[in-house]
Image: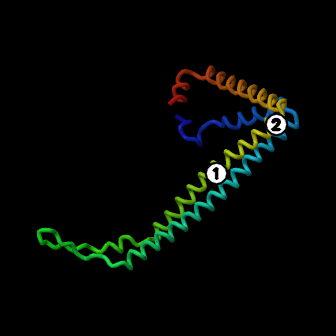
Amino acid sequence: MSESFAVLRRRRSDELAKLADQHIQHDLQQSDRDALKNAAYKVSLWTTVGSAVGVGLGLYVAFRLRSTRKALFEAFRAKEKPTKVVFADGRTESIPDVTPLLKPTTFGDFATYFFASAGGLFLGGELGFLAGASSGSRSIAAEPERKKRIETAFRKFRVDMLRKQADALDRSSEENVWNEMF
């Protein structure tokens, strides 16, 4: 039950980071490590640029949407509207004025800017990440020997990681396994 909250969980990520660092230091050459750092930098740069462009485009769209909504309201308010309806049987009903209900509000403006910029951030960040990952993988795959060394190091890391997890499961009691599953 103590692992139900993220704050209380054991620091598996620290152990995995140390294990990955050992494999990077022992299984790869300096040029391979530099290529991985360069690829990670490309992913980070493209994601940052994509996010910034996405937020900018989202704000631009929000601005355009807000000004269009405001112009539409002004045109609606200036237009002559019917005040009553006459039915076929001669009955007359008045039509309420809905103009105040259609007026743009500060909350609506805030929501427009917030959701449009959040959508732009998400879309731009994801597209930037995709472009950066593609660029980074191309730079790693440019040299077949380097790619093979990196794949081998990653495979060894995965094997060690799975062994550590299997050992931890073997050491734990049946009750602990039940708690970790649920």
The number of numbered discs placed on residues in the rendered structure image is 2
In the picture as drawn, the residue positioned furthest to the left comes out as 89
Q: Label 1 sits on what residue type?
A: Gly
Q: For the point 24% across and 73% down, which residue is it?
A: 95
Relative image position of residue 181 (x, y in whole percent): 53, 28
Horizontal side of 21 relative to 64 (left or right) equals right
Q: Residue at x 61, y 23 (%)?
A: 169
Q: Give the structural element (helix, strand or loop) at label 2.
A: loop
Circle 1: element type: helix
Q: Tell whether 134 sits left or right of 69.
A: right
**Residue at label 2?**
142
**Rendered residue at 78%/29% (across/down):** 153
First in sequence: mark 2 or mark 1?
1
From what the image shows, is residue 121 above or below residue 12?
Answer: below
Residue shown at 76%/35% (left/top)? 18
Image location (x, y in percent) of residue 107 = 46, 67
Quarter-wise, where is residue 137 in the image? top right
24 vs 46: above or below: above
Instruction: Say which quarter of the image contains residue 104.
Output: bottom left
Check disc 1 and report the residue beneath it. Answer: 125
- Res. 89 mark: none
The residue lying toward the viewer, choosing from 115 and 95, is: 95
Q: Quadrant of residue 22?
A: top right
Which residue is farthest front?
88
The reply to whether dot 2 and dot 1 touch (C-beta < 8 Å) is no
Q: Indicate the colouring scheme.
A: rainbow
Q: Position of residue 142 (x, y in %)?
A: 82, 36
* Number of other residues with Cα within 10 Å of mark 1, as a class: few under 14, some 14 to 19, many 20 or more: many
**The disc labelled 2 sits on which kind of residue?**
Ala
Please tell me which residue lies in front, 29 or 91.
91
Task: Choose mark 2 or mark 1, whichever is in front.
Answer: 2
Marks 2 and 1 sit apart, C-alpha to C-alpha, by 25 Å
